[in-house]
Amino acid sequence: MSEYKKPLPEFRPETKPYWEATKNHELKLPRSKTNNKFFFYPRAVSPYDDMSQDIEWVNASGRGKVWTYSIHNMGPTKAYKGDPPYVVALVELDEGVKMMTNIVDCDPQDVKIGMEVEVVFDDITEDVTLPKFKPVG
């Protein structure tokens, strides 16, 4: 594994289950125990139940559709030199939540809104694994 020079996620106690799952190549989402609604981004309280802390972490399907996307031809810092073009997308998971990610394993010009995608995991450091998505099939 080469040295990773891009920004790394900030680890907080409330996001620990999410990052532990991705390290194990699993996608887990927080869900309200009160109404069984999933939510994303990972946080310690449900946005649906008057900020209830009665949540659980559930394995997600890892499948969804591209909701919107952007093809980046120039990285925001020198750390991204050599990467472009790459796709930053908002994927709507089958569980109903949307998450920001990258679309990989396809030509950026082939990405389309509504395209079915599935999660893949990118082990970027010993401690950090990022969920990304590739076209189904």
Image (spheres, rainbow, N blue to C red):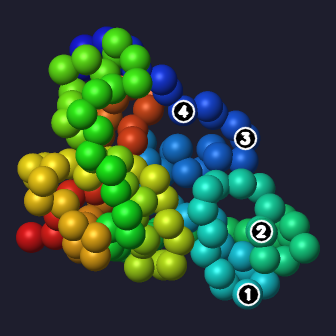
Q: Which amino acid, by three-letter code, is at mark 1?
A: Asn
Give the residue at x 49% y 27%: 8
**On-image quarter of the C terminus:** bottom left
Q: Nearer the viewer, residue 61 or 48?
A: 48
State if disc 1 and disc 4 touch (CB < 8 Å): no
Of tags 4 and 3, which is closer to the observer? 4
Distance from Cα at disc 4 to Cα at disc 2: 21 Å
Q: Which amino acid, by three-letter code, is at mark 3?
A: Pro
Q: Which is more N-terminal, label 2 or label 1? A: 1
Task: Estimate the x, y position of residue 71 in percent, counting from the top left.
Answer: 27, 46
Give the residue at x 50% y 66%: 98
Task: Estimate the x, y position of residue 48 in percent, counting from the top left.
Answer: 78, 76
Mark on residue 113?
none
What residue does disc 3 label? Answer: 13
Counting other residues with Cα less than 10 Å from the Cα at mark 1, is it few (<14), some (14-19), or many (20 or more)? Answer: few
Distance from Cα at disc 3 to Cα at disc 2: 15 Å
Mark on residue 9?
4
State if disc 2 and disc 3 touch (CB < 8 Å): no
Task: Estimate the x, y position of residue 115 in percent, counting from the top left.
Answer: 23, 72
The answer to whether residue 132 is seen in the rendering is no
Q: Residue furthest right?
A: 50
What residue does disc 1 label? Answer: 35
Q: Which is more N-terminal, label 1 or label 4? A: 4
What residue does disc 2 label? Answer: 46
* Image quarter of residue 42: bottom right
